[in-house]
Amino acid sequence: MKLFLLGAALLVASAGAQAVTGAQTVPRLPQAEAETRARTVLEGMTLDEKIGQVSMAHFFRFLEGGKSGPIAADAGDVFARLLPGATLNGGGDAPQPNTPRGWADALRGLETLGRQNLPGGVPAVFGTDAVHGVNNVPGAILYPHNLGLGAAFNPALTQELARATAADMRAMNMDWDFSPVADLGRDPRWGRFYETFGESPWLVADQITASVTGLQSGGVAATLKHFVAYGSPGLGRDRANAEISLRALHELYLPPFKAGIRAGAMSVMANSGSVNGVPVHASQNILTDLLRSELGFKGLVVSDWNDIDRLVNTFKTHADLVRATAASVNAGIDLYMVPNDVEKYEAALKEAVEGGLVSQERLDEAALRMLTFKAQLGLMDARPSGSGVITNGRALAKRAAAATLTLLENDGALPIKTGRVLVTGPAMDSAAIQLGGWSVNWQGVGKGNVSYMPKVSTLATALKASAPAGVTVSALPDSKREALLKAAANADTIVVALGEAPAAESQANNPNLSLPSGQIGLLRDLLGTGKPVVLVLMAGRPILLPEDLQNRLPAFVMAYLPGSEGGAALADALYGRAGFPGRLPFTWPGSLGEVGLTADRPPEGAGDAPLPLYPLGFGLDYTTFRTSDGQAARTADGVKISVTVTNTGEKAGTATFIVNASLPPAGNLEAVSRPVGVVRAELKKGEARTLSLDIPAERLEAFTGDAFRTVRGEVLPGQYTFKTGDELVRLSLP
């Protein structure tokens, strides 16, 4: 029997460990030793070399033809002129050939040129957004996006996926991943909602620990992003201002970042937006006082894309790039992710230093952090070259996708056992919809200059290929509406796959939480046939369906953005060969007016609260579970909860229960129910297991203080109530 206990106790790799990736062993120096070596290099650097060290140049600056091509003949001269400490690929630009081997050779070539042309022979570090596998590389297997992994409530799986991603990155000589997203998904209108692990701080924190541990044990530097409160922008619009209180900051937004820092994350990326009217890229309070002094982060702080320029051109908080540069560097930005005009930024920083706006000491500090970062990754030494061979991760991708699938409605339409099945809908065979944004190109498949079409297991193909005896499957595109409705009249079950078009960041904002009108019309027509309709939704957020349709769905499956093997995983679940282990990692609102409703919302002054369409943790399966015999006991570090979970249904399944805590009165608003952890286990028919969870004391802290005063976190004396399923247990803490 496999038992999963989710809490704070995830293994964290030590800073000085050897990271093993396939046949390679990548040295990882402890920070103190790495810093000593970095100081030796720094002492011999000129002002221009230090400025270059804290600048990042885009990968395409070193390629023939700009966006995609072989390494340019003058790439060494570009290094010698720009002296960049880092390079990056933002998605859509690529070497030639654009293959894993091509990537390995190109990056090895750039590393060699860097050693020849950069101070101390220390090459530039290459960073990329490998956010669900090595998603910019044609041929790579792509895993579910984070929101789906949040639905799996299985940090061990998240860690396994991160480790597999790191192995593929190292095989292509990539050292630095701009992942994981430690932001909370609190507003589903936001375009980056699907990049989060969900809404609940401590449940997300467990996933962040797992992701950081998996990446860095695989020899790749992780990046916590985006510090801090990026996930609660005004009006749900990307990069907008977030108005948050000190109480919300400490109770909601910091726990995932705390977890990542404790797990040893080597870098942090700054929030592209603003908090309380101050752009984070210019906030010393956030990037230095909070991140470094309060949270103890000692690694590298990198800007987000072009965000120092944004202070001048978008936020209009600074008169020119020199002043914006000085403000950002003084606030705590060590490395500027600048994609295009490196020369302009380096000139602005030099003017700021020479004019006294940025001290030589601050520049040295930033350059030292950059060099230390690279020393920790082994870049100061000769290293084995990546094999250029990435793993065949299809089995892992299918297992991951299967763990995410969440059944929201079922009146008996599932599982499909016999009869004629008709499959339709724009998502039934669309790699673009199934993979979402950050897939081959930044905005998704087919939206950039790389035209590669990934090989994915789609729903229609998988349903046909794996249909059990007694089931026949046909598929028709929704564009052939007359033929489709005629076929629907003769079907026994209709499976309709709907979904959002791929997009990323602001382009993925969905202010109405809606699908295109054509998809809604298709669903209405199919329901109008009177035949059982199974809706499969591939989307990066909860979608609001018209009430007359929502109330008529015989079966409703939330598939999130399931990755390369989503179709195969869905077919197994729809046919009953597998169950639906996923549970919602967010609160699904019933209307736009309920956006912002979360499981940890405190009581309103009127004494009531709206009920969501589906609450956090909701999900059905082909079996049922019962909780009993709940117990709570004090431990040296917090509270231990145990509960007996019994599979009361007719099939094996995965029991997942969020453990919620209710705190004693604190003088301030507190959540009626605060999620503090999860118990999860795979149980056979009729099997009962006693599951336990250790809840660290910090997860029970109340942050008390008056409206505009500093808050203080403490575990208050009084009675605490813990709820797991239907079990309530109470415990008094002194």
Image (cartoon, rainbow, N blue to C red):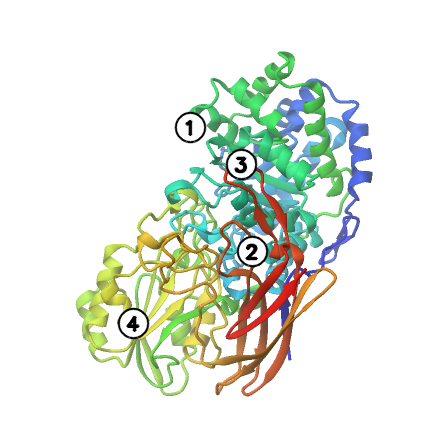
Residue 680 visible? The answer is yes
The label on residue 248 is none
Q: Position of residue 157 (x, y in %)?
A: 60, 64
Q: What amino acid type is highlighted by mark number 4?
A: Leu
- Binning the other alpha carbons within 10 Å of mark 4 as few (below 14), some (14 to 19) or many (20 upward) gives some
The picture places residue 454, in percent across and down from the top left corner, at 46, 57
- Closest to the camera, between mark 3 and mark 4, is 4
The residue pinned by badge 3 equals 304
Q: Looking at this rendering, what residue extends furthest in the top direction?
A: 355
> Residue 410 appears at what percent x and percent y?
36, 76
Say which element carries label 2: helix
In this view of the protein, can residue 392 be seen by the observer?
no
Q: Amino acid at mark 3?
A: Asp
Which residue appears at 50% of the width and 60% of the height?
A: 144
**First in sequence: mark 4 vs mark 1:** 1
What residue lies at 68% left-to-right and 29% top-to-bottom? 366
According to the picture, the residue beneath numbered tag 2 turns out to be: 204
